[in-house]
Amino acid sequence: MFSEKRKRGRPAGRTEAGEATRRRLYDVATHLVAERGYDGATLREVAERAGVSASLLYRYFPSKRAVVLAFYDELSDAYAREAAAVPRGRWRDRFAFALATSLRILGPHRNTLRALAPAMVGDGEEGLFAQATAFSRARVLAAFRAAVVGATDAPAPRLAAALARLLYLLHLAVILWWLLDRSAGQRATAGLLALLDRVMPAAALTLRLPLVRSFVLSADGLVGQALLDPP
């Protein structure tokens, strides 16, 4: 899918000490973003808090963008590994597993993700649909595709691929809801997930209708043009 020969934001010739330094700088940077917001955080302050020189920091993270890409890299890699354990079953149940896994992986990083929300939904290079973040998008989308294509009730291949992409977008909408959710313990998000569980059986039934299948394919084509296809 993409080369893993050199990790994003890591200098060549990795050593154990170098990896420890990179991890410490990464942790300081992501905590600072959660505290100050993406625009308010500066690499100068990251270096000061970590007690290193700016030149050393720039060896690992030459820009805030490099920190964000490393953040996406780590989360999408963890998600891909966990989502691979999707149980055998119907596509709607496998989608529920993929969605729940995503929320579980992202849970400890909610504050950082909330701070990054303006960048994620913007048109910049840090956005969810930017070309620079395609590596992360491809990993997560592949998990949703596997959830549908490998289901016991998987639709025909073309329809399965289209459905997977729309479910991937639905998952992003749920994540945005979760990030904005101000209810105690994110109870509103739990309610939304319960509502989806009730709706999905009906959605699976309606997918048998020619009009609904045509709608899914058409909607997927528009999604590809607007968001997912490279320019």
Image (spheres, rainbow, N blue to C red):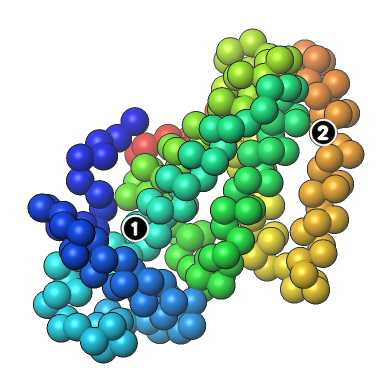
Vertical position of residue 212 compared to residue 14: above or below: above
Nearest the camera: 160 or 47? 47
Q: Estimate the x, y position of residue 193 in percent, counting from the top left.
A: 79, 49
Residue at the spot 69% in from the left edge and 34% down from the top edge:
95
**At label 2, which amino acid type do we have?**
Met
**Given the image, on which type of amino acid does mark 1 rest?**
Ala
- The numbered mark at residue 200 is 2
- Name the residue at the top extreme: 156
Residue occupying the point 68% across, 68% down? 180
- Residue 22: quarter of image: bottom left
| Element under disc 2 | helix
Q: CA distance from mark 1 to mark 2?
A: 34 Å
Nearer the observer, 214 or 200: 200
Q: Are marks 1 and 2 in contact (CB under 8 Å)?
A: no
The image shows residue 222 at horizontal and vertical percentages of 56, 33
Q: Position of residue 135 (x, y in %)?
A: 36, 42
Position of 98 compared to 194: left or right?
left
Residue at the spot x=20%, y=46% of the render?
Answer: 6
The answer to whether any part of residue 162 appears in the image is no
Element under disc 1: helix
Instruction: Determine whether 58 is above or below 175 in the image.
Output: below
Name the spot of residue 36 as percent of width and height, x first: 46, 84
Residue carrying label 1: 70
Q: Quadrant of the C terminus?
A: top left
State left or right for residue 69 relative to residue 97. Answer: left
